[in-house]
Structures are given as structure tokens and as C-alpha cells.
């Protein structure tokens, strides 16, 4: 699962440790999520969404679904 966690954290000048504290997880967990080595649990995804004031879908997305949506758009707009 791809995510924007690193970008959102950087926009706020937060360290991984600061974000980890805010989400009540370890810094290693934040690092693993940011590097796509770990997918967050649903409760953690909800906490992150609330913290950033965004919907879960605005932070986390399934790479396969994004690719499929892009392919559908390409095929739809071919004339």
C-alpha cells in the first residue's frame, strides 16, 4: 500500500519520533510505513487521518487500484 505519510510529516516539520508519539506507535513503525514495508492497521490509519485532518484515502491508497483507475481513464478518453 502506498502512502503520503512522509510528505505530510515533512510539511509539518515533524520527525518520525514526533509523529510516532502523536500516533502512539514506535518510530520504527512510522519508518516501516513510510518505506512501504508495513501496512498500518485500520485503527492506526484512522488515527493518522484524524491527526492530519484528512480522509484515510487521502493518505493511504492501494497501488493496484490506482493503476486500474489510470488505465480505465486512458481507455475511456481514447476516441
Image: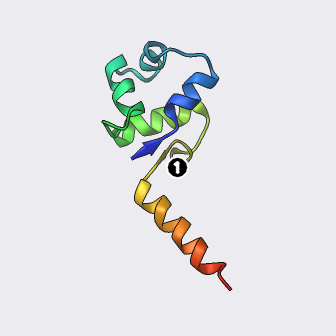
Which quadrant is the C terminus positioned in?
Answer: bottom right
Nearest to the observer: residue 53 or residue 5 = 5
Report if residue 54 is visible in the image. Answer: yes
Q: Is residue 24 above or below residue 63?
A: above
**Which x, y percent locates residue 74?**
59, 73
Question: What residue would you read off at disc 1?
Answer: 57
Q: Is residue 21 above or below residue 57?
A: above
Quadrant location of residue 77?
A: bottom right
**Which x, y percent locates residue 51?**
55, 29
**Which x, y percent locates residue 3?**
47, 41
Nearest to the observer: residue 6 or residue 53 = 6
What colour scheme was applied to this rendering of the protein?
A: rainbow
**Residue located farthest toward the bottom when viewing the structure as drawn:** 79
User: What's the residue at 65%, 81% (across, down)?
Assistant: 78
Report if residue 26 is visible in the image. Answer: no
**Which x, y percent locates residue 41?**
33, 39
- Mark 1 lies on a secondary structure that is helix
User: What's the residue at 50%, 32% (across, down)?
Assistant: 5
User: What's the residue at 55%, 16% (across, down)?
Assistant: 14
- The number of numbered discs placed on residues in the rendered structure image is 1
Q: Residues within 10 Å of mark 1 (few under 14, many from 20)?
A: few
Q: Is residue 13 above or below residue 5?
A: above
Q: Is residue 45 left or right of residue 70?
A: left
**Residue located farthest toward the front when viewing the structure as drawn:** 79
Amino acid at each position: 500500500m502506498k502512502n503520503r505519510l512522509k510528505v505530510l510529516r515533512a510539511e509539518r516539520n515533524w520527525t518520525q519520533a514526533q509523529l510516532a508519539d502523536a500516533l502512539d506507535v514506535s518510530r520504527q513503525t512510522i519508518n516501516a510505513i513510510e518505506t512501504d514495508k508495513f501496512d498500518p492497521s485500520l485503527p492506526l490509519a484512522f488515527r493518522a487521518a484524524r491527526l492530519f485532518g484528512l480522509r484515510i484515502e487521502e493518505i493511504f491508497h492501494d497501488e493496484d487500484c490506482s493503476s486500474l483507475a489510470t488505465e480505465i481513464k486512458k481507455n475511456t478518453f481514447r476516441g
